[in-house]
Amino acid sequence: MLYQSERKLIVTILKKMVDVGLVINTSGNVSIKINDYFLITPSGASYDNLSPADILVMDHNKQIIEGKLLPSSETDLHYSLYENRSDIKAIVHTHSLYATAVSSITDELPAIHYQIIDLGGPVPVAPYETFGSPELAAAVVDKIADKNAVLMQNHGAVTVGDNLDIALQRSILLEWIASLYLISLHSGQPSFIDNKKLKNAVEQKQKYLTLRQDKKKQS
């Protein structure tokens, strides 16, 4: 079986998504790009019984190399994101509760917490388009730009990364920030972090990343 360990990882990630409440039933999908191949979840399959062999391996022409099930309805979305940005190696798409709720009331999730820098700053909302359509793929690509997350109006969310663990962590973070935003709106008039202060947070994060790396080299 091609890419056995990577397909096993996708199944593990899907189960984590269920455990933390990012997906219900068969909603959401996951993919990895390896060279010219794409590993993606099947359409409409129960995550409870999913096996590594159920994860499809596809080529750059969207032809199935391995796998007997129908690929995700959002295959075009995944391919479009990979084609648009060479730094993207993994994608997580969810219909998570808070992120989807935020997508229905604003055109951008603002910087209500500094950790939003891990998502590339305030998260844009792509306009509603029919799921699985080329129009939806184009709308998401247009809005994500150089960010690591995008909300899809009345639909859900997409997070990206250079590996699947990072893409999942960003999806979990996005859901938490979305919940914080909604709670703050309900509680009063929330304050937001401006771009200058977000830039300072980015620099501070890089500072501590460098310090940790230096400490690790010394140990």
Image (cartoon, rainbow, N blue to C red):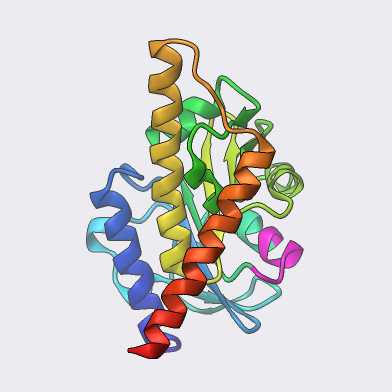
Q: Residue at x 68, y 39 (%)?
A: 195
Task: Find residue 187 and report its horizontal and vertical position in percent.
Answer: 38, 12
Can you see residue 57?
Answer: yes
- Looking at the image, is 42 positioned above or below residue 149? below
Above/below status of 138 relative to 191: below
Where residue 23 appears, x then y in whole percent? 35, 45
Q: Quadrant of the C terminus?
A: bottom left
Which region of the structure is painted magenta? Answer: 80-87
Q: Please say whether residue 33 is one of the residues in the magenta stretch.
A: no
Question: Where residue 71 sits in the image (x, y, percent)?
Answer: 51, 62
Circle count = 0
Indicate left or right for 104 with 185 as reference.
Answer: right
Q: Residue 32 in the image: state x and y as whole percent.
A: 52, 71
In this orientation, which residue lies closer to the viewer: 116 or 41? 116
Q: Residue at x 36, y 48 (%)?
A: 26
Who is closer to the viewer here, 203 or 156? 203
Q: Is residue 120 above or below residue 153?
A: below
Q: Horizontally, is 77 left or right of 207 in the view?
A: right
Report the quarter where the N terminus lies. Answer: bottom left
Is residue 191 positioned above or below 166 on the image? above
**Displayed quadrant of residue 80:** bottom right
Quadrant of residue 27 within the rendered picture: top left
Do we see residue 40 in this rendering? no
Which is the main secondary structure of the residues drawn in magenta? helix
